Amino acid sequence: MASIATSRIKPKHQRLVLLVVALVVLVAAGLLAAWALRNQASYFYVPSEMQADPPEPGRAVRLGGMVEEGSLKTQADGVTIAFVVGDGDARIPVRFSGIVPSLFVEGSGVVAEGRLGPDGTFLADNLLAKHDENYVPRELQEMSEHQTERVVAAPQ
């Protein structure tokens, strides 16, 4: 009986072993998550950065900038649009097929998610329209300033 009692691990050492096992599991989970997401990272470029150091073809990236005035053209199929994103220093042509966000207009900010094509055209899979701090929803545009303040301040 005495040999069984002495071979048991002390509670202090059990906690230490449990802590070490938990740390190993956490590190392994972090490494596994990083390995799984290694190709999912989407880098953000502005036009001048993309022109100076373009990503490799086929790599998922984001392109942000301003939609240049007069550059927005709807293609013959009615679904595809072509436009130019600029940052004041460089210009990148963009092509997108799909439903365009309602805030997307010439002269506004845009973030396009997609890939750079071999011809230098950015092929967007998704468009995110940006608005300035003065944005007012369409529904509130016709309300007076006093009515808008009451609607915005009302508890939900």
Image (cartoon, rainbow, N blue to C red):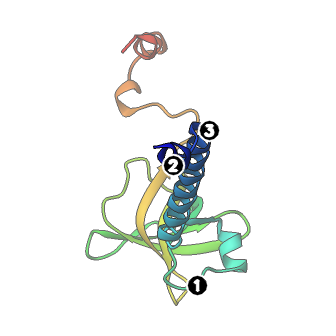
Give the labeled residue for mark 1. 56
Q: Residue 9: x percent and y percent?
A: 55, 46
> Would residue 90 be visible to someone looking at this image?
no
> Viewer-nearest of labels 1 and 2?
2
Cα distance in 3D space between marks 1 and 2: 66 Å
Secondary element at tag 1: loop
Amino acid at circle 3? Lys
Amino acid at circle 2? Ser
In which quadrant will I find the C terminus? top left
Cα distance in 3D space between marks 2 and 3: 20 Å
| Residue 48 in the image: above or below residue 135 | below
Label 1, residues with CA under 10 Å away: few <14, some 14-19, many ≥20:
few
Give the labeled residue for mark 2. 3
* Foreground pick, 133 / 2: 2
> Viewer-nearest of labels 3 and 1?
3
Secondary element at tag 2: helix
In which quadrant will I find the N terminus? top left
Amino acid at circle 1? Glu
* Foreground pick, 155 / 2: 2
Q: Residue 135: x percent and y percent?
A: 51, 34
Label 3, residues with CA under 10 Å away: few <14, some 14-19, many ≥20:
few
- Residue drawn at (70%, 79%), measured in percent from left and top? 53
Find out whether the residues at labels 2 and 3 contact each other: C-beta distance under 8 Å.
no
Give the labeled residue for mark 3. 12
User: Exactly how many numbered labels are in the figure?
Assistant: 3
- Residue drawn at (48%, 65%), measured in percent from left and top? 113
